[in-house]
């Protein structure tokens, strides 16, 4: 389930508004009502934060309509110590052309076709070599050209990366700009 942070604030504000509007006038009931609504508000906030933290952290945006995939990707450490991974399936007319694996952490992969089973990034089928981006003096950037799929894939470690998250700027675009 996907929960946007703004909607959580509206939901909590809604609860607070209605708890004030329909609260009983009795002191005993007011205490119960206040503690009930406080519990509901705290519970909603905790659930929303938990869902947001566990959700895949990719924020798409594009400045050029010819780009296939552009945005910010965050690979964060989960409670089990593993970093998150996101897979993008590129479909054309319902047929899977390729899949892009972002993460875990500084690993990336592009495979021809789309399949349900997870593929290892060190597999010979991975079109990105090297598949793990090197970190040098706190900076990392790599560009791969994949002529067999007519793709250029660039990843850049973004500012604001923390010890428990790696934040990346992702750009996947065609190698050749076609003129139409």
Image (cartoon, grey):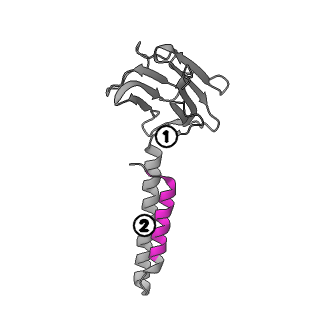
Q: Which residue is mark 2?
A: 39
Can I make out residue 134 in this image?
no
Q: Say whether residue 78 is left or right of residue 61.
A: left
Q: Which residue is mark 1?
A: 57
Please provide percent x and percent y for residue 41. 45, 65
Query: Which callout, 1 or 2, points at the residue further toward the start of the chain?
Result: 2
| Prevailing secondary structure class for the magenta stretch in the rendered image | helix
Residue 122: image quadrant is top left
Q: Which residues are magenta?
A: 3-19
CB atoms of marks 1 and 2 within 8 Å = no
Can I make out residue 38 in this image?
yes
Q: Secondary structure at mark 1?
A: strand
Please provide percent x and percent y for residue 111. 41, 20
Q: Is residue 18 magenta?
A: yes
Q: Say whether residue 152 is left or right of residue 115.
A: right
Q: Nearer the viewer, residue 87 or 147?
A: 147
Quick check: 80 above or below 41? above
The residue depicted at 44 percent of the width and 52 percent of the height is 3
Please provide percent x and percent y for residue 2. 42, 49
Using a 10 Å C-alpha cutoff, classify the residue at mark 1 as few (fewer than 14 neighbours), some (14 to 19) or many (20 or more). some
Residue extending furthest top?
124
Q: Secondary structure at mark 2?
A: helix
The residue depicted at 52 percent of the width and 57 percent of the height is 6
Q: Say whether residue 170 is left or right of residue 14.
A: right
């Amino acid at each position: 389930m996907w929960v946007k942070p703004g909607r959580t604030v509206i939901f909590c504000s809604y609860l607070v508004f209605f708890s004030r509007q329909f609260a009983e006038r009795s002191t005993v009931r007011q205490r119960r009502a206040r503690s009930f609504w406080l519990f509901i508000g705290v519970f909603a906030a905790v659930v929303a934060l938990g869902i947001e933290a566990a959700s895949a952290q990719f924020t798409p945006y594009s400045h050029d309509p010819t780009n296939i995939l552009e945005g910010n990707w965050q690979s964060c450490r989960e409670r089990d110590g593993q970093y998150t991974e996101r897979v993008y399936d590129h479909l054309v007319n319902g047929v899977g052309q390729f899949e892009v694996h972002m993460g875990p952490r500084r690993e990336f992969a592009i495979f021809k076709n789309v399949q349900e089973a997870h593929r290892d990034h060190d597999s010979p089928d991975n079109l990105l070599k090297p598949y793990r981006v090197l970190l040098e003096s706190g900076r990392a950037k790599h560009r791969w050209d994949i002529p067999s799929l007519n793709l250029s894939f660039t990843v850049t470690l973004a500012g604001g990366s923390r010890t428990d998250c790696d934040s990346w700027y992702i750009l996947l675009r065609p190698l050749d700009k076609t003129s139409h």
